[in-house]
Image (cartoon, helix red, strand yellow):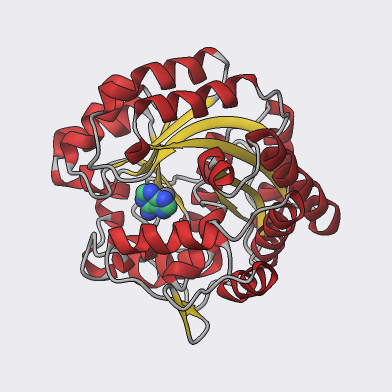
Amino acid sequence: MLPKAELHCHIEGAAPPALVARQAAKYGADISGFIRDGAYFWHDFTSFLAAYDAAASLFRSEEDYAALAEAHLAALAAHGAIYAEFFTSPDHARRAGLSAQAYTRALGEGILRARAKTGIEARMIVTGVRHFGPPSVEDAARFAATCGHPLVTGFGMAGDERAGHPRDFARAFAIAREAGLGITVHAGEFGGPDSVEAALDHLRPARIGHGVRAAERPELLARIAQEGVVLEVCPVSNVALGVFPDLASHPFPRLLAAGCRLTLNSDDPPHFHTDLGREYAVAAEHFGLDEAALAGLTRTALEAAFLDEETRRALLARLAGAAGQPLGAAANPGGKTAAKLGKIH
Ligand SMILES: Nc1ncnc2[nH]cnc12
Ligand SMILES: [Zn+2]
């Protein structure tokens, strides 16, 4: 199985409906407003965020979160993932009655359990929620900067990109950057190329969550390629949330052809009926990537991971061993490889 790596997944958004139903039974909650026939339902980005928040509110104890992280990472490992980062949201934990410290400790425990069982490596990216406003995002950044958890290696911002302007969040990102954390930010999903440009100018991220609407402005694509900013692309999420009407219209091939460094991600997998294995299969079937190009995406993810160099080297060696590539050879993630693979496992 091709080794895979994921950089962009929200831990609360990764909760399978069956697990959420068990949590609801445990806490005597009604889930009929957002889960029906064993699946999440919502109809637009706003109602998606409401379903996401409702599911998150049913994870309330340290054990709830440890079990969620362990289950998420075990599922990823079963799809061939050797490395995963996930977004954490202290705001959601606090709203569910758990301190940011307890929440982070619990998720870290889940990571260790999953690593012991499957060998998967994982790290956490603390996020602020954009539509909760700058003071709340600054609180999240301060927590990320001071929590001292060894598996917290990045800071980011999710939520509704249409709320506020990136400059409003510059202080939060400066706090995180000065603490040595890797920086990523959601942009260019529901906001157009201006949103991506403003995020680059004001927040100086190493990676952008989505970024796909940069494809509407060729000069911006050239800048992203030239600066080596990595895009965390989530194709199935983009179609599910209506950013593009179908996979045939997704700009992934154009981003690749422009020389942008790309990775594949599932975002909030059960909400979009996807998983990391499906994202790689979609890239093969719909974007024409062959196995070497797919391995190149994994390699880009490992190169862009918010990770210590020793662990990065070990993971890159695992990938090179499995993909039959010499370590030093560029896997050419920006290449225009076209051969289709029938099936990617
Ligand atoms: N796709 C997405 N965009 C922005 N914020 C999110 N939070 C969870 N999923 C998200
Ligand atoms: Zn996201």
Residue at 72% x, 39% y: name it.
102
Q: Is residue 266 left or right of residue 58?
A: left
Q: Position of residue 187 (x, y in %)?
A: 30, 40
Residue at 37% x, 37% y: name it.
132
The answer to whether 279 is drawn above or below residue 193 in the figure is below
Residue at 85% x, 52% y: name it.
116
The answer to whether 311 is drawn above or below residue 173 in the figure is below
The single residue placed furthest to the front in the displayed view is 28
The single residue placed furthest to the top in the displayed view is 178
* Quadrant of the rendered image containing residue 134: top left
Of 231 and 97, which appears nearest the observer?
A: 97
* Quadrant of the rendered image containing residue 24: bottom right
**Can residue 294 be seen?**
yes
Residue at 23% x, 50% y: name it.
190
The single residue placed furthest to the right in the displayed view is 116
The single residue placed furthest to the bottom in the displayed view is 37
Q: Position of residue 331 (x, y in %)?
A: 51, 46
User: From the image, which quarter does the N terminus lie in?
Assistant: bottom right
Q: Position of residue 29 (x, y in %)?
A: 57, 70
Q: Is residue 115 left or right of residue 29?
A: right
The answer to whether 92 is drawn above or below residue 305 in the figure is below
User: From the image, which quarter does the C terminus lie in?
Assistant: bottom right
